[in-house]
Amino acid sequence: MPGFQQNPYNWIKHAKALVLSSDFEGLPTVLIEALAVGTPVVSTNCTFGPSEILTGELSNYLVPAGQSEALANVVKQVLADKPNVENADILKQVQAEQVALQYLALAN
């Protein structure tokens, strides 16, 4: 392991996949960050977050929390599938323009 990295995005971008195996999350930003740089993700479907980020075809890469064998199988699957994540729905929702419009709507 390389230890602390000031900028982890280069590492994430060149990974074959990012795996999040949390029992609990609030907003798992690392999933959005991985998708933004084109890296497929596998995640446990813990309470809050992952199922809101991994929608449509990407929901195939959600695994119930606590099921390590299923997680390993889905990691193998994402590596075999090599899904194109560039058009993930969440990426449209977190674009700067979209977020700015949401803030402006709150101010009105």
Image: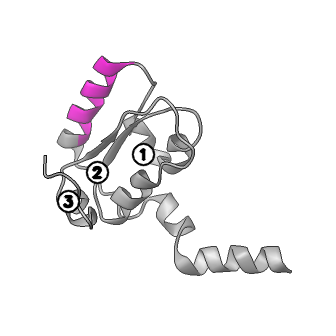
Magenta segment:
67-78
Please tell me which of labels 2 and 3 falls first in the chain.
3
Image quarter (top left, top right, bottom left or bottom right) of the C terminus:
bottom right
Question: Magenta span: helix, strand or loop, mainly?
Answer: helix
Residue 24 magenta-highlighted: no
Residue furthest toward the left?
Answer: 1
The residue pinned by badge 3 equals: 11
Please tell me which of labels 1 and 3 falls first in the chain.
3
Residue 77 magenta-highlighted: yes
Helix, strand or loop status at disc 1: helix
What percent of the width, then of the height, locates residue 57? 42, 45
What percent of the width, then of the height, locates residue 78? 26, 40
Please tell me which of labels 2 and 1 falls first in the chain.
1
Helix, strand or loop status at disc 2: loop
Task: Please say if the residues under marks 1 and 3 sit with CB atoms less than 8 Å apart.
Answer: no
43 left or right of 72 in image: right
Helix, strand or loop status at disc 3: helix
Real-space CA distance between mark 1 and mark 3, rounded to the nearest whole angstrom: 25 Å
As drawn, 94 above or below 96: above
Q: Decide which of 93, 107 is in the foreground and name it.
A: 107
The residue pinned by badge 1 equals: 57
Residue occupying image coordinates x 37% and y 33%: 21
The residue pinned by badge 2 equals: 83
Tell me the crowding category of disc 3: few under 14, some 14 to 19, or many 20 or more residues within 10 angstroms, Cα based.
few
Task: Please say if the residues under marks 2 and 1 sit with CB atoms less than 8 Å apart.
Answer: yes
